[in-house]
Image: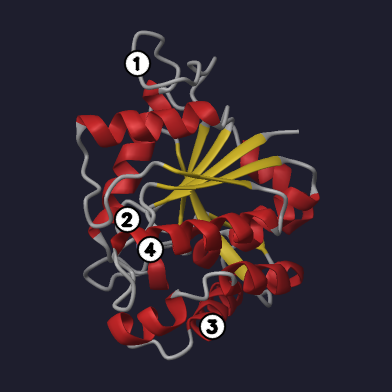
Amino acid sequence: MAKILAVHAHPDDVEHLCAGTLAVLARGGHEIVIATMTAGECGSDSTDLAATAAIRRGEAARAAALIGARYACADIPDLGVFNDDRCRRAAVELVRAAGAEIVLTASPADYHPDHEATSQLVRDACFAASVPNYATGAAAPLAAIPHLYFVDPIGGRDREGVPVVPEFGCEVSDAMETKRRMLGEHASQAAWVARQHGIADHLASMETWTRRRGADFGVAAAEGFRQYRHQPYPKTPRLQELLGAALLTAKG
Ligand SMILES: [Zn+2]
């Protein structure tokens, strides 16, 4: 069994982009932690910062619990995620506390500054997590650098609208109901996403996206991934092997 950490910027990002894959992995008996760099406290126009953070932490914890996962938050301010010392130490603490062997994180190119910063921070946190002299908090340094994977950006495109092509996919056709229920826990975001993003139905938007990625692979629903293999990160296909029959390699 593997220890898997999925860490993104805000509550509901993981649910949009890789919750189906986490459901598949949870079914396989793997230990999963869902984490966010922020509590997403700017994601409301009807409740204040503290109330919004509390609401969204509760939503994220309930979504994680649906697949038997734990939820953790690094408590960095929303729209305040930067590639700096504080945020890097917080990201490393998340990776260490999860005892992560496999890490899924944000795409290096995405629509939101917190997403792009989270991607850089978690990439570098995977390296730093096994450095004993790098102090973070209570969690012990890891024995090794985890296998690192980037999820799709929102909408599958970078800021210039150029498609971001996944290296492989996970078929989530039979995990869609779980994915829908996980995102459905983020009830506070329905009105916010409609106001800020002009998306009337965030559940339908997620479903449309997941089915579009599925069509790229010739299946009903999928989520895409790219493995980060730069020296000295592990290059073996650990996640791909865990996905088993759900692994989609030929983009067609
Ligand atoms: Zn986000």
The residue under the point 64% across, 74% down is 180
In the picture provided, is 208 more to the left or to the right than 124? right
Where residue 176 sits, quadrant-wise, is bottom right
Q: Which residue is mark 4?
A: 51
Which of discs 2 and 3 lies nearer the camera? The answer is 2
Q: Which residue is mark 3?
A: 208
Question: Badges 2 and 1: C-beta atoms under 8 Å apart?
Answer: no
Residue 4 vs 211, above or below: the answer is above
Asked if the residue at label 1 sits under 8 Å from ligand 1, the reply is no
Q: Which residue is mark 2?
A: 115
Identity, as a three-letter code, of the amino acid under mark 1: Ala
Asked if the residue at label 2 sits under 8 Å from ligand 1, the reply is yes
Q: How many marks?
A: 4
The residue under the point 29% across, 67% down is 48
- Residue 11 at least partly seen: no
Q: Which residue is mark 1?
A: 135
Q: CA distance from mark 4 to mark 1?
A: 31 Å
The N terminus - image quarter: top right
